[in-house]
Image: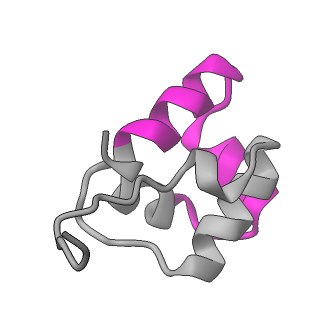
Amino acid sequence: MSIKYIIAEIRHEKNMTQKQLAKKAGVSTAMISFIENDKRQPTFYVIALIAKALDVRVDELVVIKDTHRFFK
């Protein structure tokens, strides 16, 4: 699942609007909208701010895909 869906899902579970999340995270409402609509990829710093505002760990927002097979 993409970060945009994860953030939106957790935000809805916590009954928060984009505006409320933005204010709590210290970012613009437009930034939250852009992330949730897949128009921007957040920096790690913004992900950390959003995680703190949602009261979750950063790794709950980020999905790492292992598309490279370095080890056989």
As drawn, 45 above or below 21: below
Image-based side of 40 in relation to 51, left or right: left
Image-based side of 66 in relation to 15, left or right: left
The residue at 59%/67% (across/down) is 47
Q: How many marks?
A: 0
Which image quarter is the C terminus in?
bottom left
Image-based side of 29 in relation to 56, left or right: left
Which image quarter is the N terminus in?
top left
Q: Which residues are magenta?
A: 5-29
| x then y, percent, for residue 51 | 70, 54
Q: Indicate whether residue 3 is drawn in magenta.
A: no
The residue at 68%/47% (across/down) is 21
Residue 45 placement: quadrant: bottom right
The residue at 57%/78% (across/down) is 44
Of all residues, the one furthest to the front in this rendering is 72
| x then y, percent, for residue 9 | 49, 28
| x then y, percent, for residue 8 | 47, 36
Q: Compare residues 61 and 34 and report the one nearer the observer.
A: 61
Q: Indicate whether residue 15 is drawn in magenta.
A: yes
Examine the residues drawn in magenta and state their main secondary structure: helix
As drawn, 2 above or below 26: above
The residue at 46%/38% (across/down) is 6
Q: Compare residues 67 and 40 and report the one nearer the observer.
A: 67
Residue 68 placement: quadrant: bottom left
The colour scheme used to paint the residues is one colour
Residue 18 placement: quadrant: top right
